[in-house]
Amino acid sequence: MTEIHGNYADFEGLREQAIALRREGLSLRQIRDRLKVHNNDILQRLVKGEPPPEWTKRPNAKDDLREKARELRLQGMTYDRIQVELGCSKSSISLWVRDLPKPERRRTREEASAIAKRGWEATLRRREMERQQTRKVATDDIGEMSDRELFLLGVGLYWAEGSKAKEHRRQERVTFINSDPHMIEVYLAWLRLLGVSADRLRFHVQIHESANVAGAERYWAELTDADTAAFGKTSLKKHNPKTRRKKVGEEYRGCLVVRVLQSAELYRRVEGWWCGIVVAALAPDHQNRT
């Protein structure tokens, strides 16, 4: 189906399709991709009143953990041992089993300390699993990205991290600097969307002199797939041994500066696009728009 623009004049027809897909067991993301409806408010209205399919509901792991914790407590286990077994925090265990009898302690202080350490390690592993699961679900929520979505994202990205002209220094240049490789990749994708050709791009690395400079230069060159002639001289920052921030390790590759040649006109357009985003976002009827 082609995307419906404007105020979604065929809303009722679209709602019938959305409900049918919902009853077939599709998730919101799948319905969005199938019907090409990328407005979350509209999407929610289309399926209003229809319960989500069972497979999209997250199980309440806390309920299962609570029951298991109570079983282990009745077997005579302490908070530390329950934490080792289940990987949940002792504060949660305390809430779940505080009405149950307290078991008699039969271990030395060293044994108790070792159990407590294992319990904390189990908690950290559980938290990391939850973190990764939440991240995966959030990643899946994004789905496909339209050119317009990338366009708007890029404008906001540049206005947050790119160079901007000042009243006292009207240097209208499109220059972007960041240490996050994914941020650089998204920014370069945005420039390609705008039609900025590779021969207009210039790069140079900024990094602490105590780091692996050659390795960082190779890394950024491979990431950008740019010709070596497009890279200028690397800027080295003097290392201050007193600073708490340690610029060491394989993960540290400094920052990459990306400059667009002959970019005054592009800069003015970016500035205007950002103003348009601000005006649209702050419009009085923003909450009522569809």
Image (spheres, helix red, strand yellow):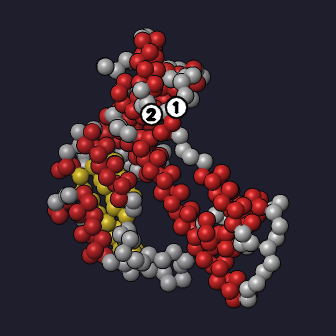
| Residue 268 appears in the rendering | no
Find out whether the residues at labels 2 and 1 contact each other: C-beta distance under 8 Å.
Answer: yes
Name the residue at 35% across, 41% down.
267
Residue 185 sits above or below residue 269 on the image:
below
Residue 38 sits above or below residue 119 on the image:
above
- Image quadrant holding the N terminus, namely top left
Residue 29 sits above or below residue 7 on the image:
below
Residue indicated by mark 2: 27
65 relative position to 149: left or right: right
Q: CA distance from mark 2 to mark 1?
A: 7 Å
Name the residue at 44% across, 75% down.
247
Q: Quadrant of residue 207?
A: bottom left
Which of these two is toward me, 87 or 4? 87
Q: Quadrant of residue 29?
A: top left
For residue 175, which numbered disc appears in the image? Answer: none
Q: Secondary structure at mark 1?
A: loop
Q: Residues within 10 Å of mark 1 (few under 14, many from 20)?
A: some
Q: Amino acid at mark 2?
A: Ser
- x and y, in percent, of residue 21 in the image: 41, 24
Residue 275 sits above or below residue 200 on the image:
above
Residue indicated by mark 1: 52
- x and y, in percent, of residue 256 in the image: 34, 61
Q: Secondary structure at mark 2?
A: loop
Q: Amino acid at mark 1?
A: Pro
Which of these two is toward me, 170 or 9? 9
| Residue 197 appears in the rendering | yes
- x and y, in percent, of residue 23 in the image: 46, 25
Name the residue at 27% across, 67% down.
219
- x and y, in percent, of residue 261 in the image: 25, 49
Of the image marks 2 and 1, the number of the one nearer the N terminus: 2
284 relative position to 16: left or right: right
Which of these two is toward me, 105 or 210? 105
